[in-house]
Image (cartoon, rainbow, N blue to C red):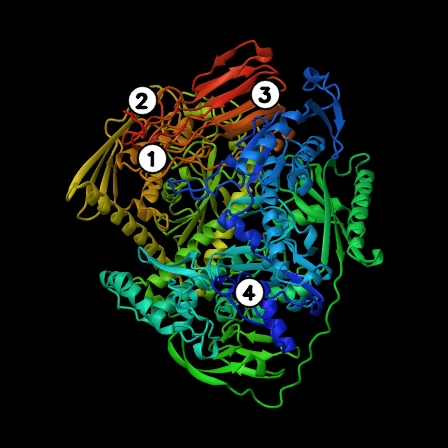
Amino acid sequence: RRVKLLSVDPSNYPDAPREGIRRILEAATGVAHPRGVPLDSSLIAWIRMGTTVATNALLERDGAKTALLVTKGFRDALYIGTQARPDIFDLRVRCPGVLYDEVVEVDERVLLSKGDGSAEDAPRAGLPRVAGVTGETLLVERPPDLEAVRERLTALRRDKGIEAVAIVFMHAYAYDAHEKAVAQVAREVGFQQVTMSSGTLPMVRLVPRGFTATADAYLTPKIQAYLDSFVQGFDSGIGSVDISFMQSDGGLAPAGSFSGFRAVLSGPAGGYIGYARTAYTEGGPPVIGFDMGGTSTDVSRYAGTVEQVFEARISGVTIQAPQLDIRTVAAGGGSRFSFREGLFAVGPESVRAHPGPVCYRKGGFLATTDANAVLGRIRPELFPSIFGPGEDQPLDVAGARRAFEELLDAQIRPWFAAAGGAPLSVEEAAFGFVKVANEAMCRPIREMTQMRGHDAAGHVLACFGGAGGQHACAVARALGMRRVFVHRHASILSAVGIALADVVVEAQEAAALMHGAEGAAARVAERHEALEAQVTEQLAQQGFAREDVRLERFLNLRYEGTDAAIMVQQPLTASSFGAAFEAQHLREFGFSLSSRPIAIDDIRVRGTGASPQPEPEQPPQAAGPPVPCGSGQTYFEGGWRETPSYALADLRPGHVLHGPALLLDDISTVVVEPGCVATVTPRGDLEVDVGGADTPLEEPPAKRPRGHVAGETAWAGARAGDEATAGSPVDPIRLSIYAHRFMGIAEQMGRTLQRTSVSTNIKERLDFSCAIFDPHGGLVANAPHIPVHLGAMQDAVRVQQARWAGDIWPGDVLVSNHPQLAGGSHLPDITVITPAFAPDGGAAPVFWVASRGHHADIGGSTPGSMPPFSHSLDEEGAQIVGFKLVDKGRFMEEGIRQILSKSRNLADNVSDLKAQVAANTMGLSLLRALVSESSLPTVCSYMAHIQANAEASVRAMLRAFAASTGMGGRGCVRARDRLDEGAEIVLEITVDATDGSATFDFTGTSPQLHANLNAPKAVTYSAVIYSLRCLCDTEMPLNQGCLAPITFIIPAGCMLNPSPTAAVVGGNVLTSQRVVDVVLKAFGACAASQGCMNNLTFGDETFGYYETVAGGAGAGPSWDGRSGVHTHMTNTRITDPEVLERRYPVLLRAFSLRAGSGGAGRHPGGDGVLREIEFLRPVDLSILSERRALPPYGLAGGCDGARGENLLLLPGGAGTISLGGKASLPVAAGARVRLLTPGGGGYGPPEGGGQGD
């Protein structure tokens, strides 16, 4: 039995699951169970639930009041996180808030031993040595002062109302005694919820483990409160009912052990198990799960085994725990519609169940459900009448039509009239929004399949969720899929999956072993056996006989020196974990590093207690043809079609239905589109053959050629007849779809590069960018990776176009890095460029793709190729104006090795260049697939249209700025700023409001410097395009169109247009930031941010390390500056504290906010950070930084942010030395470098008087 009710309806019932049980009991027994009367639990054998309580608490930040107890020096480590900002174009730098209310720094510390008798350990020879669970030796530098902790916790509970405690100590994954001791004190004080980071998932990396522990402490009381509330609606017998919850990993857990950090994917996990158990057949094609609900759509893949990840970011919180690999896109039945600058937009905002779409009669907003109602895909007369104040009215289709008319009249029709297009009808607009929503849902499916070398078209689409059936045929057709599977209970498949799921218990511990080393195999076997005993005992306590428990062993493995770990299941054959890891690494990343040792990071066991499976239903065969229950008009491509409706309950095995048709039950609708054929299977499920898809189903993984990607030979498959649109007025619906596709291609290139690279800079710090270009080298789409690369790469492409004109062929790949002669940014940023030719072998490429990555070393006078005091380009490394990295398909390894021969890490350079080639190859493949779906002229046409759309957005912004400042038809604004050395950046912006254009004139900027703060023109272009995109403050494509309204005047020989031999390494990382500050100052947009990237490098002849460090963001007219974040032209991640100490001979003594460093103001600037590193052996240290002499400016009366400082603390407390903004020097063991990064400027006069200059 099934009932449909709103998930949130507070005016009628307090809890939807309990209300559902009440209605089921009434329907099943025929006995009234009034609301407000405890339910009879004797009628219930078990209850299994998935819940969104944890997810909603994360989204709404509505968990328990929590205190974070963290190692002294790291109070803000979770606030800073990776230091990257979520949206690089958001000047407000909106980040999800932290989950804790109070922080207690506990003065405790354990250190990793660098080896008995090692020079690094010698100064600490007297410290107690303890054994970690990893097998490592640790040194106890300071145990926690438990009485001091008790005093603080008592005060927090008494005075602050703190309900839960999360304990996160450095290296607790290996040595948990300190966390356990403090946890005991917390319980004695009276805290019911105490979470230790070592007790969640004891893996290396302080920040994600800390997020996980904090999430658990924050969410578990909320779950427990919900469970208490839920059972209060039953009689006293509920205690004997087996109540289980679905966990994020796809297994069930009893209510008593269901915890917050394992609950965040509880609902989606049920759907995954549901389709995996019902849609997949052994040896058959893999299945894509397509779960479309009200607020979002979840997609996943199943090919015989559950696909899991061990870290995911959910609502801004990194959760480190086993969880099903489910990708979520903000496009569901409740996704809100809007029209933005000529683009149809679906989501990411949701109208939610309350107030919901317009048709719900609760004062809601236009959403996908409204479009389907208007298009006749939802029949109000056959849909439950549960809407309106009395829950007794049908869907309001007329109200939805009126809302569409209002949107058309207010925004869409005026835009069409201005663009010379015919006005849209309500149906055309609604159908356009549905097509855009479908494309948004296709994007993660392409990503999940193509990124792993699978053909999306070779999968079965398993459709479920309340709204999935309305879109499944269209989504499958767009992906080239041939078959859609719709379970007979598709609208509640998550519940079906929960009913079919097994009980799962997992145990895991950290390790520090090398695979194949002496004693490693014995240690692994011993720990596996201990963990197996642990999970078996827990399952036995839940009633599972030991012989009925299935045990699986895993190791988390990675190549030494990399961070790309893979959880590998013990092979069923005689092959070793190592062989399985190498095979999986090759499959996942496209390469192996067979010469490198394999590190064992974690040992894991998964125990499964199988749930009883119900007998498959065998409905009676059809006795005749299906009989419609009604008919009506439904809108499809081309217009209205008379469409019969069938009740799903009346369909029987053997029934065949030709589209168009609507298949209805009281919960959902399945739309069988024209050209599709639906067949009812012997079990009563639906299989839909999708017309127009003739791609063969994908072979099972064992038979499929490795690396096959859809569209690799697709140029010739382009549909004829589509060319007619190439010269036609732009269609904003198609424009919106192509915007998704172009950006999706650039993003998939980036993911390919990250996966296949080997260096820390690219794979972990994400210091790279990928883009696609039109036939003329104009930027079409640049994935939002590193802002300093944004506008620079198109110059690099155009230089190579001119350089190799007449001598470029299919199979060629070009490489360059020269900043002044080849459109580069600085020498470590190497650009790889690949042309795409039409199938007829035309002389000129029709597209270009490129990737730019920061290589850790390419020679030069200092390790890392970032010399602080370089005076010429020759001192900064190898220079490439242009070279054929691949010549007609042959990788020119000898040639590139010769060019980069002075690199200190040539092997990684070559490997990363191959990864860049692979990323470009992925981009070409996806462009070919796009062409195959339409035509080459159409794709080229929409490349131009998407550039024109960006141009129109910038022109509109410039006109609005002119109007807001009262400058009339033409006016000027000016700004200037000085670097610490005194060099000046001068800018005059002349805005012509008549056509929305502007001239950016840098006349007056200082001459070229005898230093490395010169910035090539390409960097200035990047800074301006970034600034303009931020100022537009709306979702829009970022491409060459942004610069079309801009005329540049950058005098030759100035520091922003230097000679070809000028040093520029600091211009890319420092001057670029100051150019942005000057542009934003001229527009009055916000105060200055830290104006620096705080470049820090250190190393010796055996290793090198490079990082950039966060600071404060500038405040604006309506926002405070964000603290401890990367701003403007960079967005690279910081190395996790525990990883830093494990991998390098250093101790991270502090990483926290620099309190009070943000400028005061009505809106204060963000604080910089304090980062202090102690060196355990002598190293060479280099610092390249700015804003050490001149502070970040405040704006509109706001005060300046604090200047940064670079200090060297001598060993043994012998003194402190100020290093200035630039330094390069050897430092002794025991010395510490302390970076105090600049704060952001304040905006507006501070309350209480006083103001900035």
Label 2 vs label 4, nearer the camera: 2
Image quadrant holding the N terminus, namely bottom right
Q: Position of residue 292 (x, y in %)?
A: 52, 64
Q: CA distance from mark 3 to mark 4?
A: 54 Å
Mark 1 and mark 3 residues within 8 Å of each other at the beta carbon: no
Q: Image quarter for residue 71? A: top right
Q: Which residue is mark 2?
A: 983
User: Residue 57 bears which disc, if any?
Assistant: none
Which residue is nearer to you in this view: 342 or 255? 255
- The three-letter amino acid code for the residue at tag 1 is Thr
Q: Which residue is mark 3?
A: 1174
Q: Which residue is mark 1?
A: 1020
Q: Position of residue 759 (x, y in %)?
A: 57, 36
**Residue in the image at 32% along x and 19% along y:** 982
The image shows residue 822, relative to residue 353, as above or below, that is: above
Q: Position of residue 1146 (x, y in %)?
A: 61, 24
Q: Which residue is mark 4?
A: 457
**Residue in the image at 22% along x and 60% along y:** 418
Image quadrant holding the C terminus, namely top left
**Residue in the image at 66% along x and 67% along y:** 280
Q: Is residue 1155 visible?
A: yes
- Mark 4 falls on what kind of element? helix
- The three-letter amino acid code for the residue at tag 2 is Ala
